[in-house]
Image: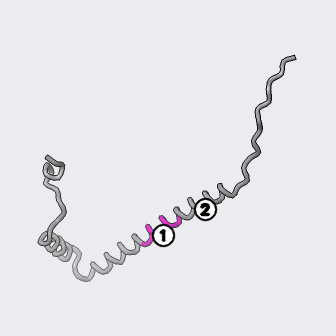
């Protein structure tokens, strides 16, 4: 038995999607849906912008690390007992 069959979970089919859309229309009304979609679009755009900024900062940090001159390597001196 798979986990999906235990909990009876699966992706909705065609008729379920139609039912979901009708319920959303009833709950939010025709006038609120464009505002809802606009808000979702804004949120996705802000998320993608933030993701791009983080990626650029990481890449910039990696470039700076590669361009930084390496510290001179020192060899350990032997302890000489007198």
* 50 within the magenta span: yes
* Residue at the extreme top of the image, as rendered: 82
Q: 43 and 49: which one is in front?
A: 49
Q: Residue at x 35, y 72 (%)?
A: 40
Which quadrant of the view contains residue 30? bottom left
Report whether 21 appears left or right of 53: left
Q: Residue at x 16, y 75 (%)?
A: 22
Assign a secondary structure to mark 2: helix
Residue 68: x %, y % from top left? 70, 55
Q: Residue at x 17, y 71 (%)?
A: 17
Q: Earlier in the sequence, mark 1 or mark 2?
A: 1
Label 2 crowd bin: few (<14), some (14–19), many (20+), radius 10 Å: few
Q: Which residue is mark 2?
A: 60
Residue 4: x %, y % from top left? 17, 52
Stretch in magenta: 45-54
- Looking at the rendering, in which quadrant would you find the C terminus? top right
Q: 60 and 49: which one is in front?
A: 60
Residue 16: x %, y % from top left? 14, 69
CA distance separating discs 1 and 2: 16 Å
Numbered tag placed on residue 49 in the rendering: 1
């Amino acid at each position: 038995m798979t986990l999906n069959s235990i909990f009876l979970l699966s992706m909705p089919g065609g008729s379920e999607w139609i039912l979901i859309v009708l319920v959303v229309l009833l709950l939010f009304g025709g006038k609120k849906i464009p505002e809802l979609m606009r808000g979702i679009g804004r949120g996705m755009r802000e998320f993608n912008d933030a993701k791009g900024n983080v990626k650029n900062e990481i890449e910039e940090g990696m470039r700076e690390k590669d361009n930084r001159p390496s510290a001179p390597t020192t060899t350990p001196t032997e302890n000489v007992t007198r």
